[in-house]
Image: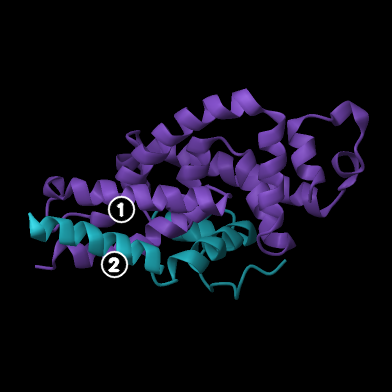
Chain colours: A purple, B cyan
Amino acid sequence: MKAFRDELLEHMPAIRGFARTFERDAARADDLVQDTLMKAWANRENYKPGTNMKAWLFTILRNVYISYYRKKRREVEDTDGAMTASLAEKGRQEGHMAVLKLREALAELPDEQRESLIMVGAAGFSYDEAAEIAGVAAGTIKSRVSRARARLTELLGEADGHSGAGATGDPALIGAGTIRQAAF
Amino acid sequence: MTNGDGKPEGDAQEAPAPAEAEGVQAQDPVMGQLKALYDDVASEPLPDDLMKLLDKLDQVERTR
């Protein structure tokens, strides 16, 4: 039987992959990964050897970011504009256009759609596994994934095609979302 | 719009249940991008700070 530590090391890269895809702010993503690692270690007695450690870790990661965003949301409401600007600033530093557009589009998705999409479409979980992790029915994951896919395709299509209104700053469209888009 | 070298079997529109999770990314350029974004990071070795953190956790345990 593999030592807990070795198995943990084997699956942490997947946790990083998820976190960096789910959360576009790299520093925040790294915080999520670190907290997940610490929680996993602290709770290692609860892990049953031979079961799916990757799924177990994702469940922990999920709990970490749910409580994290609950906290964060309050802060965002407090600082509003400043926060939006600094997020745009950070986003600008990472990667080329295609990646930025993808990250921007992902950020538009509701959390539960984004997580479902990444678990199934990128991290390699089956609908059943993703359902187990998220604590919902497999059918719910399926519909979240398909809605997320459709929305993502739509958003990326918009970005490629008629990029008009948002970018040129139509006054009617100015709002938090537009400000973020305009930054790119 | 190429979505990779098309797999010979499985009609794009009507691909039925079995390997649907796989199919999600195989047939769709957007999903391909998403997968690439994820794989980029997931294929990197763990950064030093995480390794150090784990070593520290491990050591705390041993000295107890």
Where in the figure is residue A23, as x and y percent of width and height? Answer: 53, 47
Left or right: residue A150 versus residue A181 is: left
Crowd rating for badge 1 (residues with CA inside 10 Å; few <14, some 14–19, many 20+):
many
Which image quarter: residue A87? Answer: top right
**Where in the figure is residue A4, as x and y percent of width and height?**
16, 61
Residue tagged 1: A37
SS class, disc 2: helix
Residue A75: quarter of image: top right
The residue depicted at 92 percent of the width and 42 percent of the height is A168
Residue A2 place in picture, x, y as percent: 13, 68
Disc 1 versus disc 2: nearer the observer: 1
- The answer to the question of whether label 1 and label 2 lie on touching residues, with beta carbons closer than 8 A, is no
- Which chain is mark 2 on? A
Q: Is residue A124 visible?
A: no
Name which of mark 1 and mark 2 comes first in the sequence.
2
Image vertical order of residue B35 relative to residue A78, above or below:
below
Which chain letter matches label 1? A
